[in-house]
Image (tube, grey):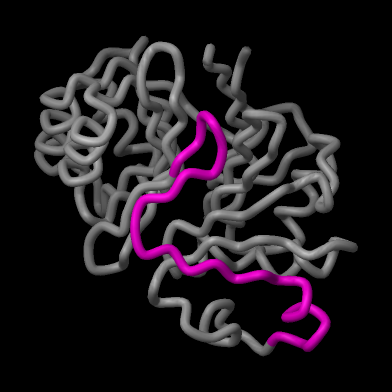
Amino acid sequence: MKAKIICVYDNGAKVNTSFIGAHGLSMLIDVDGQKTLFDTGMRGRYLLHNLSFMKVKPDDIDRVVISHNHRSNVGGLKSLIEARDGTLDVYVNGYFEGIKGFLGRSVGQEVESKMNLIHMDGDISLSDHLDVIGPFGDVQEFFPILRSRNGPVILSSCYHCGVDAPLDAVKERYGRQAYSMVGGVHLPKAKQKTVDPVSEAISAHGVSELHINHCATPKGIVYMRTHFGLNNVHDLFVGDSISYDL
């Protein structure tokens, strides 16, 4: 059995394709016969465009997990729900108290009626090989965990809380260090001297491979490669996918 993670929304897109790159993050986790969308990017029309070229229909998605309430992570949700015929389970953190506050804009009754908000206040299991851990830090960030044959794979939006607490939680919960990190690592105004401590912390947790995008920024990713080597830090643009044995 295999699981697949597909980048749906990122600042960059694969060249010579019809995918659109724009500021934001969304990844599709295909595992256990279910499709879980992790975050929804900033703009709904780009999210739906990229899903269409991946031949994924909005109603094919079984659930959405929102990492935290920043526009680049939740902005596309309303358009996704409007494009669906059926209802959608949407997992959110404790800051999403109201529908309007959740999306940052007015929401019609039709959209509200199609969205089943599920508030997460701790670790949860979504399927045999997919969990979500959190919350972490001031923004109450949540992280999906794919339980692969080689060890836990942690998906991230930003690591606003830093990398130590989530990676420590993975080791404590699963008895193994994270095998792979997938997604964004917040590296504002990336410089070698600010990226090195983050890279050293990741190394200390024994992570074997990194697929990095979004808020790591192109410059930050280059500096991470300086630490880990060219072959250990992989780009993850819109249209890229990663497969894991279960």
Residue at horizontal 60 percent and vertical 52 percent from the top = 22
Q: Position of residue 59 (x, y in %)?
A: 83, 52
Tell me the residue at 46%/30% (across/down).
146
Along the line of sight, the residue nearer the viewer: 241 or 137: 137
Task: Specify whether 68 is left or right of 52.
Answer: left
Residue drawn at x 73%, y 39% as measured from the top left: 19
Q: Is residue 108 left or right of residue 63?
A: right
Q: Is residue 225 left or right of residue 77?
A: left
Q: Position of residue 197 (x, y in %)?
A: 10, 37
**Side of 12 where 132 appears, left or right:** left
Q: In the figure, 114 relative to 213: above or below?
A: below
Q: Could you tell me which residue is drawn at 30 percent across and 67 percent down? A: 139
The range drawn in magenta is 107-131
Q: Tell me: residue 239, above or below residue 151.
A: below
Query: Which residue is at the front of the view, 97 or 69?
Result: 97
Residue 173, image x, y percentages: 25, 35
Quadrant where the N terminus is found in the figure: top right
Q: Position of residue 225 (x, y in %)?
A: 28, 22
Q: Residue furthest right?
A: 85
Residue 73 painted magenta: no
- The part of the image, by quadrant, that contains residue 169 is top left
Q: Is residue 158 above or below residue 98?
A: above
| Front one among 22 and 129 | 129
The number of numbered discs placed on residues in the rendered structure image is 0
